Amino acid sequence: MRKLRKVIAMALMSAVVIAGTPAFNNDVKAVTINSDAGAITQWQTNAITNPVAGKLVPAGYVDIKWTSANDLGEVKGYKLYVDDALVNTATSNSTQFEYYTTVVSRHKVYIIAEFTDGSSITSSTFYFYVTKKGLCVNNEMGKMLIPDGMNIGWYYNWGVNPFTYSCYTDIDYVPMIWGTNSERYISSIASKGYKYLLAYNEPDMGANVGGSNINVNTAINNWNKFLGYNFHLGSPAPALSPSWGIDNNTGGKWFRTFMNGIDHSTIDFIPLHCYYGTYGGVEAANTFLTDVVDKTYEMYHKPIWITEFAPSGWGYSNSYGRKQCKEFLEAVLKGLDERSYVERYSWFSFDTTDETNGAAALWTNKTGVLTDLGNAYVANGNPEGYSYGNCTAIDNSTMNVVYASLQND
């Protein structure tokens, strides 16, 4: 077949390439006439296999994969373009590249296959959409929810196993080592190829308030158990911001002590939590963004995830509290999306039945029906041009709920 490749000297139509960017989709840079014209078109149309065209994907490291063009000729190499910028020059044996972005936007991607005979073929143009938005949700919280309609790119459940019912299978899952008893799962998580791992959950808080309650020296001594794997590793997620209490050695003391005891290069990102009691609206959003997110980044210069956050202290029946939560959510999501060093975030949804904190609920657990705040979460934090939908409840009997219990201490 390679002997049949004949390069036409005349440009006929689209052989001319300007600045390395195709003038339009399906551009064959060196026009070829051979018996495999259909194969060329098929490769162009299906060249990019990941991300799926039009798919909403989480910010951070995105695996871009493509189909080999070796069946079309002797490949010299590939050039990968994202948003019309050359991001990778790959060898003939390469078919994937890990591309990093925190830009909440539609992203354009195409690839050029270059052959040893001097010809080249440009794939069709593909588009994928990046979001930072995710969900933190356990089985009881999320079994009635349909996450596809919430415009999220990822989720975690405080455990080491993803949900196995079908509505979560196409959403990126991030496992967590909740406490020291879960450390035995680190190697198996790595073997499954997960891209990220979250470490201890609120080790600076007691078990009576949901923390993993780990002595900071134990956490420092055990940190080597997390190292030597291919996943991107998050630090322990403190309940109290590292930026709090610096002057009097309180507040985020646990996290600061931990960071002083380990090699910072072993940490790829820092997850944060924040719950403001009866403090919401735009003012609270700006305080959170500047005093928690910005200051933590300034301290360690590591990408930031916010894996739990919401205002607290208002019941669902409190209309003022619901208004404050909505204003907070809309302002804070905008601010997080604008910060290039923020990779991901996930709102913590209290249940509407929680008389203390229910104003921050995105849905009612037993029905999966979204609140007004939940609809605001759906509508905000989306890349421009992405067509978002609504999340609706379904009968639990239609789900195949097969979920292992969380591996908590």
Image (cartoon, grey):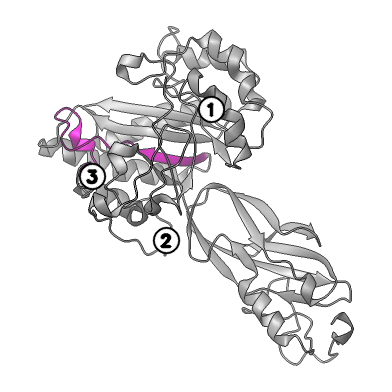
**Which quadrant holds residue 49?**
bottom right
Residue at 34% in and 21% down:
210
Q: Which of marks 3 and 2 is in front?
A: 3
Pinpoint residue 369: horizontal percent, then vertical percent.
Answer: 21, 50
Secondary structure under tag 3 reads loop
Kindly identify which residue carries mark 1: 298
Instruction: Decide which of tag 3 and tag 1 comes sooner along the chain.
Output: 1
Separation of residues labelled 3 and 1 (CA atoms): 34 Å
Contact? badges 2 and 1 (CB < 8 Å):
no
Kindly identify which residue carries mark 2: 384
Quadrant including the N terminus: bottom right
> Where is 367 relative to 71, above or below?
above
Prevailing secondary structure class for the magenta stretch in the rendered image = loop
Q: Mark 1: which amino acid?
A: Glu
**Which quadrant holds residue 394?**
bottom left
Question: 56 or 251: nearer the eye?
Answer: 56
Contact? badges 3 and 2 (CB < 8 Å):
no
**Which quadrant holds residue 46?**
bottom right
Contact? badges 3 and 1 (CB < 8 Å):
no
**Residue 357 on the magenta span:** yes
Pinpoint residue 367: horizontal percent, then vertical percent.
Answer: 20, 47
Q: Residue 199 shows which numbered tag?
A: none
Quadrant including the C terminus: top left
Q: What residue span does the magenta drawing correspond to? A: 342-365
